[in-house]
Amino acid sequence: MKKIMQGNEAIARGAWEAGVTVGCAYPGTPSSEILAEISVYDEIYTEWSPNEKIAVEVAHGASLAGGRAIACMKHVGLNVAADPFMTISYTGIKGGFVIVVADDPGQHSSQNEQDSRNWTRFGKVPMLEPADSQECKDFTKIAFDISERFDTPVLLRTETRVSHCDSVVELGERKESAIQKGLNTKDTPKYVMVPMYSRVKRVALEDKIGKLAVYADTEFPCNVMEINDTSIGFISSGVSCLYTKDVFPQYSFLKLGMVWPLPKNMIADFFKKVKKVIVVEELDPFLETEIRAMGYKVWHGKDLIPSTGELSPGIIKQSLMKAVTGKSYKSPKILIKPEDLPRRPPNLCAGCSHRPLFYALKKLGLYVFGDIGCYALAVAPPLAAMHASTCMGAGIGGAYGAGKVLGKEGLGKICAVLGDSTFLHSGIGPLMDTVYNKGYSTTIILDNRITAMTGQQETPGTGYTIKGEPAAMVDYEQIVRAVGVKNVRKVDPYNIEATMEVIRKEVNRDDASAIITVNSPCMLLRRANPLGKFKHPVYVTDTDMCRGCKACLEINCPAISWREGAGITKAGRKRTGTVLINKDQCAGCEVCVQVCKFEAIVPGK
């Protein structure tokens, strides 16, 4: 049976066919759909873990009990999971254990651009890299077999295009693992990494990598050499290989499905068969560096191909056309210039509770240490109310650290803002540090009852599991009080004046405080019925009252627009234009009503 599948969906299918029993993840684009798709298979226990480190630890525990397990994350998530990951390569596994890491070249939805292939060499574990949905499914199954055969976790690396593009997949049946389930206390030296055991495992790890290198050369079925025109040969992997074949199909190719350890003998054979070798890869010169280190002369690589951003057939053609064919690259005619297209910057949803909160912060003139989530969109004008953001949970530590430098002069000037899911992911520790070490910064937790930006995934704060079953729900006030915060306030962000009053008081305290938003579920969370809290479904502009002051445009609501055109108000005042409210987008949140000083925004039908 064949089916068109997204790459992430195919990985989920591969996990099911491989007999996986436990799947864990923290959502992050472009990996989020993998666990969501795995959760539809009743044979697999799935969970949204509070963070990636916990996901890897839970999955590894399942592996030690004999079950096949998978943990999924985006590239920056592996940074968070690095602590257990780096030691699991020593301990090894029992049931097959695969870690899926999805890179985001071009930073479509990420704070940085990383090449996760560097983790495979650093962690001394094998890595497979599929190029399409069929390979996503097949490589997932092969990864579990490799994991159990060589007693190692296996990294499966995808990229945005592989994760999110659809192609045909041949489906198979589920096959349960032959590993016997259970725990054995005699395995203690294998799984307890104190120095007397880890030193032995360190030596064994090198031997394991050597055996994997032989396997990559002699048995792995998806390192494929294709000899055509031998004047030029391309070495590539993943989607980059597909792009290159699309542009230069007549030449020879060595497609690497296993990017670590590399098949040295196969690479040597390829260099013997072709005259000139070009290495094509997205992001870092990982393959190129390793191949050059083997002593081979690479004709071209990153000297011509960009090392930042996504590749595409067009970029590869532009980069290599002159070198490969001797002909200059001719840019295609552009019928529509990019500057002529309407600009559609990402924006908070109409009615989003983050909007009035950040509007209040801007009016108070605070320096805001932000975090990762929907609310990072508040950095854009006209809100322009976020001033620093690095990684999950860093806003709290940043605000605390800045306060230590500024001292009393910083009172009333600093705050940290993060979402509820981010707080549970990695915000509790820095808040504890702030209180313990006598910091004074204010932390604002935006409780919108969901992991919003990555697609409405559940958290320990929503009261539901990944399958929608009722579960225990975190009480944020109790958590912040438990770590020592004495000053805890709750605010309804839709009441701007009251919110500003609370924030103004708390940021001027000389000890740590926390503010938690309430009655502010994500506008897309139908279960919470956020629209039910508003008095009116839509608002409109009374054009006779509107003075064209543009104050309401400062909240950057997508339902509000400006129409040029001179006019006169009912009071006889001249104006250069007026504000319009799109009734199909208005959520009735009344934020613009509070901002308008001339009662020009009124309930509509």
Image (cartoon, grey):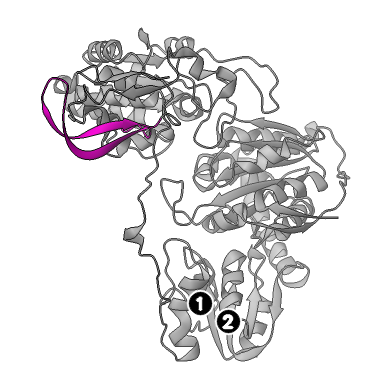
Task: Name the mark on residue 131.
Answer: none
Which is more toward the observer, 153 or 457? 457
The residue nearer to you, when weighing 591 against 41, is: 591
Q: CA distance from mark 1 to mark 2?
A: 23 Å
Q: Is residue 200 visible?
A: no
Q: Is residue 569 above or below residue 506?
A: below
Residue 69 seen in render: yes
Up-down relation of residue 61 to residue 114 (above or below): above
Check disc 2 and report its element: helix, strand or loop.
Answer: loop
- What number of labels is visible? 2
Q: Identify which residue is drawn at 38% across, 26% down.
A: 354
Residue found 41% across the figure and 38% down from its top: 391
Magenta stretch holds residue 563: yes
The answer to whether residue 554 is left or right of residue 589 is: left
Q: Position of residue 408 (x, y in %)?
A: 16, 19
Question: Which residue lies at the image location 57% right of the left edge and 75% below the top edge?
Answer: 244
Question: Along the horizontal axis of the image, is 361 left or right of 74?
Answer: left
How far across and how far down the image is residue 234, in percent?
58, 79
Which quarter of the rendered picture does the N terminus lie within? bottom right
Type of the residue with mark 2: Phe
Residue 275 picture location, percent across and down: 57, 91
Task: From the image, tell me which residue sits under label 1.
Answer: 292
Q: Single out the mark in the foreground, 1 or 2.
A: 2
Which mark is drawn over residue 248? Answer: 2
Span highlighted in magenta in the image: 556-582
For the view shown, which residue lies furthest in the left direction?
Answer: 573
Tag 1–tag 2 contact (CB < 8 Å): no
The answer to which of 372 and 58 lies nearer the viewer is: 372
Type of residue at label 1? Arg
Q: Is residue 324 above or below residue 241?
A: below
Quadrant where the C terminus sits is top left
Query: Which quadrant of the figure has residue 333?
Result: bottom left
